[in-house]
Image: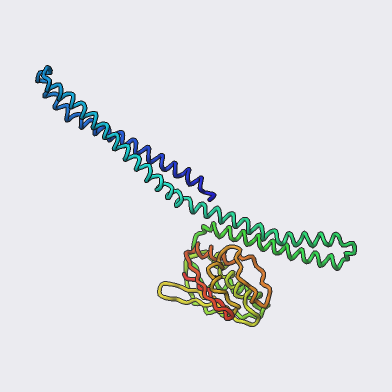
């Protein structure tokens, strides 16, 4: 465990604070108890001052009094020692538990960041490696002509576009994680209409029809972020649908909730994969798709971050071979 040493250090700090407080209170308790006990015997001593100290009985009583005081102080010290030992043991276990509980979110965040960096590095390396390999092969080819050179440049340009897409997605994800925009009263149907309008050319290329049934609804939110969220989900619906299919978009009011349903007639998602589709760089099995689908698995992560910033939930239901439905609940 990478965080074992920090856990122990934080636990030791907690224990130190607790023990300092416990010892201070123990010293105060000892002084108060010892003084109160001594005062009781002090009254006896005043009474004996009026008697003759030459009497053997009086001397024996004085000796017994001193022994009782010493015995009380010793027992008090021993009991306080046992009490502080018990406090030490209990606080050690409790402190370690609290240290783990308080540092676990930090550990998880660092692990997530480390995983994100590793995944991003891998995804960035893939197109760069492809470009490097193609260029090295071309440079060794002494018979390389202009036609082949143009093909190479075209291939490199495609890889550069992939890098641009990835870097843009990473920036969007970073912005969505630090989204502190002021929400405004806006028309939800207009935000969805803007998303549909922006994706209409993409849908037309695949002969996909987007059917919208949008009630006029007002909500609080950031329009640009919501447009981006709907665009991501709609784009996925188009991307994973075959040519000539239909994507349905509608706004439904249920009591105090507003639901936006986006349903496609695509290949669907395995039920075992649905819990992971919002994870960064996660891509569902696309082997059932008739077309090669490009993506880095960042889109739905961005959509989820935007939804979280608006305190909106997203549920997903899917049937393999029939399609998927995203429900955004406001």
Residue 202 screen position, x and y as percent: 66, 74
Quadrant in which residue 290 is drawn: bottom right
User: As rendered, which of 264 and 318 lies closer to the eye?
Assistant: 318
Q: Looking at the image, can residue 224 be seen? A: no
Residue 83 screen position, x and y as percent: 31, 40
Residue 318 screen position, x and y as percent: 54, 76
Quadrant in which residue 248 is drawn: bottom right
Residue 70 screen position, x and y as percent: 24, 28
Side (left or right) of 153 relative to 113:
right
Residue at far right of view: 143
Q: Looking at the image, can residue 234 be seen? A: yes
Task: Describe the colour scheme in one phrase.
Answer: rainbow
Tell me if residue 141 comes above or below residue 60 in the rendering.
below
Q: How many marks?
A: 0
Side (left or right) of 13 relative to 196:
left
Q: Residue at x 54, y 71 (%)?
A: 272
Residue at far bottom of view: 244
Q: Residue at x 64, y 82 (%)?
A: 244
């Amino acid at each position: 465990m990478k965080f074992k040493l920090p856990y122990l250090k934080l636990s030791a700090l907690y224990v130190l604070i607790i023990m300092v407080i416990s010892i201070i209170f123990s010293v105060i308790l000892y002084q108060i108890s010892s003084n109160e006990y001594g005062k009781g015997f002090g009254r006896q001593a005043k009474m004996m001052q009026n008697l003759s100290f030459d009497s053997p009985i009086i001397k024996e009583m004085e000796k017994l009094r001193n022994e009782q005081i010493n015995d009380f102080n010793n027992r008090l010290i021993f009991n306080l020692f046992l009490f502080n030992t018990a406090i030490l043991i209990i606080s050690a276990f409790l402190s370690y538990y609290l240290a783990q509980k308080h540092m676990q979110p930090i550990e998880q965040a660092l692990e997530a960041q480390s995983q994100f960096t590793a995944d991003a590095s891998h995804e960035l390396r893939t197109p760069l490696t492809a470009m490097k390999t193609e260029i090295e092969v071309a440079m060794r080819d002494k018979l390389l002509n202009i036609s082949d050179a143009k093909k190479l440049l075209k291939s490199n340009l495609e890889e550069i576009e992939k890098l641009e897409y990835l870097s843009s997605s990473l920036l969007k994800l970073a912005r969505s994680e630090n989204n502190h925009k002021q929400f405004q009263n806006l028309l939800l149907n207009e935000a969805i209409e803007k998303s549909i309008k922006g994706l209409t050319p993409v849908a037309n290329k695949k002969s996909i029809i987007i059917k919208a049934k949008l009630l006029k609804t007002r909500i609080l939110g950031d329009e640009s972020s919501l447009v981006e969220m709907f665009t991501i989900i709609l784009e996925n619906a188009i991307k994973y649908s075959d040519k000539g299919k239909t994507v349905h978009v509608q706004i439904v009011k249920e009591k105090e909730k507003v639901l936006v349903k986006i349903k496609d007639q695509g290949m669907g998602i395995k039920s075992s994969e649905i819990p992971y589709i919002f994870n960064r760089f996660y891509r569902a099995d696309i082997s059932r798709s008739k077309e090669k689908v490009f993506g880095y698995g960042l889109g739905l992560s961005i959509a989820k971050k935007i939804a979280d910033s608006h305190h909106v939930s997203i549920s997903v239901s899917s049937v393999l071979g029939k399609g998927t439905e995203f429900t955004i609940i406001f």
